[in-house]
Amino acid sequence: MTIQSKMIEGVKIKKLNLIPDERGFLMEILRSDDEIFEKFGQVYITTAYPGVVKAWHAHRFQDDNITVVKGMAKIVLCDLREKSKTYRVVNEFFAGEHNQILVHVPKLVYHGFKCVGDEEVFVVNVTTNTYNYKNPDELRLPFDTDKINYNWERRNY
């Protein structure tokens, strides 16, 4: 497995600003005046229990804007767009309470995440399209597919 430092074409990272006070905190995730904002489709939250992998999927028509609001996740992207300058590049991001970022995932880039903490992880996704129940915009591969050179196991460096 090779994680390349080269950013996949179209992927963008936004460092999130957490503003704490004695009552708690506020953290803006995505604003309509952000450079990465395209349009609003919907917002949803998904969770995973410790050690669970939710991968791989991509969309033909929508971009995703993913952040972790509780816990820690390893978010992994792979570019399988044959005409892309970053074809077969894999990016890995650790996001959550210890690294508050938003990951912008462009159309046709496969992605998934794994809960890497010892508590359930809460992931928020702001999509550019709404989910179509009758004709879902989803391309799926198993988490352990041979088409993506990635091993979800923890590495002890």
Image (tube, rainbow, N blue to C red):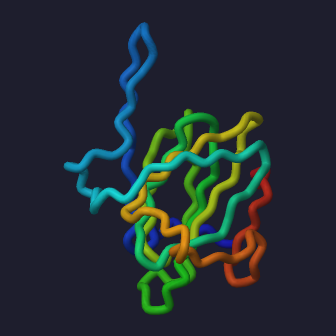
| Residue 90 in view of the camera | no
Whether residue 105 sits left or right of residue 56 in the image: it is left
Report the front residue among 6 and 32.
Answer: 32
Query: How many marks can you see?
Result: 0
Query: Who's the residue at 46% across and 79% down the image?
Result: 60
Q: Is residue 69 above or below residue 11?
A: above
Whether residue 138 sits left or right of residue 65 in the image: it is right
| Residue 145 in view of the camera | yes
Whether residue 24 sits left or right of residue 93 in the image: it is left
Q: Residue furthest left?
A: 33
Q: Is residue 60 above or below residue 83?
A: above
Whether residue 124 sits left or right of residue 129 in the image: it is right
Q: Percent from the top left, x then y, of residue 128?
A: 37, 62
Query: Who's the residue at 51% across and 66% down the image?
Result: 5
Q: Is residue 17 above or below residue 146?
A: above
Query: Who's the residue at 49% across and 69% down the image?
Result: 132
Q: Percent from the top left, x then y, of residue 24?
A: 45, 16
* Figure quadrant of residue 103: bottom left
Query: Who's the residue at 42% across and 84% down the image?
Result: 85
Q: Residue furthest front?
A: 134
Q: Percent from the top left, x then y, of residue 1?
A: 71, 72
Report the front residue among 88 and 35.
Answer: 35
Q: Percent from the top left, x then y, of residue 144?
A: 78, 72
* Figure quadrant of residue 78: bottom right
Q: Residue furthest bottom?
A: 83
